[in-house]
Amino acid sequence: MKIEKIVFATGNAGKVREIPAILADLGLEVVSMKEAGIRVDIEENGSTYEENAMIKSRVVAEALKGAGRQAHTVVMADDSGLEIDYLNREPGIYSARYLGEDTSYRIKNANLISRLDGVPEEERTARFVCAIGAVLPDGRELTSRGVIEGRIGYEERGSNGFGYDPIFYVPEFGCTTAELTEEQKNRVSHRGNALQAMKAQLLEMMNEQEI
Ligand code: IMP
């Protein structure tokens, strides 16, 4: 299958920075939906990361098709979130909406830390989860998932990354994902892992002979 371009269905500035870097070695043109001139409102009403990722990529694929621009183009979306075990895996798929979409992460992070007040190290386990959903030029759909395990810290640390990164401590690195460089984070993150798995599937599709 001929694939020349990937349109990424996200408006999140943190993701718009990370995703093209992770996909760069495919040698395809990678653009955000904004750069592709697609403006759509998407209601994420799925009950899993995979469902939400597919909802987003389908809406953008339809919009591209409507504009007659879906040829050789893959639409991809990510849905991701932070699961804190002590809080019954909250905020989970509601991570972006937690305490309100427009509430600053200073406030969201402080709130989560205070909800873990007095909780010992070994019970502060958490993970970032990312699902990628893709619609291929012929309408076929693919999904992949990636995870990174860590713990919720006691204070915000670091200013790289975005969202909950300053409170997500990764024991192997001895720091939060906001203290990793973008390259380090992409190598080990949920989004990095999910996109690597998606890349492998896409490469297989690109090697498929057209009949
Ligand atoms: P989505 O756009 O619905 O997938 O929202 C995912 C939300 O999960 C983001 O807005 C962040 O709050 C959180 N999140 C996902 N990935 C990361 C990450 O890599 N670092 C920090 N927060 C993240």
Image (cartoon, grey):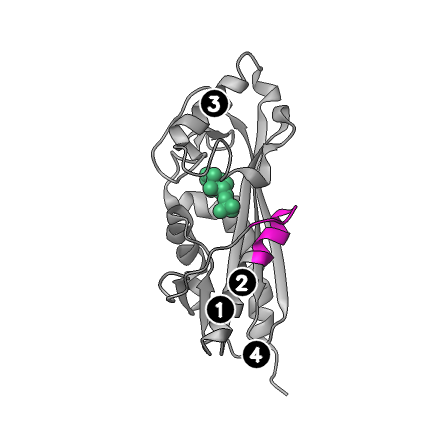
Query: Is residue 155 shown to the viewer in this render?
Result: yes
Q: Secondary structure at mark 3?
A: helix
Which marked residue is nearer to the observer: mark 4 or mark 3?
A: 3
In this rendered view, identify the residue nearer to me: 37 or 122: 37
Helix, strand or loop under label 4: loop
Q: Residues within 10 Å of mark 1 (few under 14, many from 20)?
A: some
Q: Which residue is mark 2?
A: 59
* Sequence-first disc among 3 and 1: 1
150 on left or right of 154 = right
Viewer-nearest residue: 61 or 127: 61
The CA span between labels 2 and 1 is 6 Å
Q: What's the amino acid at mark 1? A: Ala
Nearer to us of marks 3 and 2 is 2
Residue 92, labelled with which disc? none
Do the residues under discs 2 and 1 have CB atoms within 8 angstroms?
yes
Query: For mark 3, does the 10 Å Cα neighbourhood hold few (<14), some (14 to 19), or many (20 or more) residues?
Result: few
Residue type highlighted by circle 2: Val
The residue where tag 3 is placed is: 111
Q: Which residue is mark 1?
A: 63
Task: Rate crowding at label 2 as few (under 14), some (14 to 19) or many (20 or more) other CA atoms within 10 Å.
Answer: some
For image coordinates 50% across by 38% down, the residue present is 97
Q: Earlier in the sequence, mark 1 or mark 4?
A: 4
Q: Secondary structure at mark 1?
A: helix
3D distance between C-alphas at marks 1 and 4: 21 Å
Q: Position of residue 65 (x, y in %)?
A: 50, 74
Q: Position of residue 121 (x, y in %)?
A: 56, 18
Query: Measured along the vertical axis of the image, is residue 5 above or below residue 157?
Result: below
Q: Which mark is residue 1?
A: 4
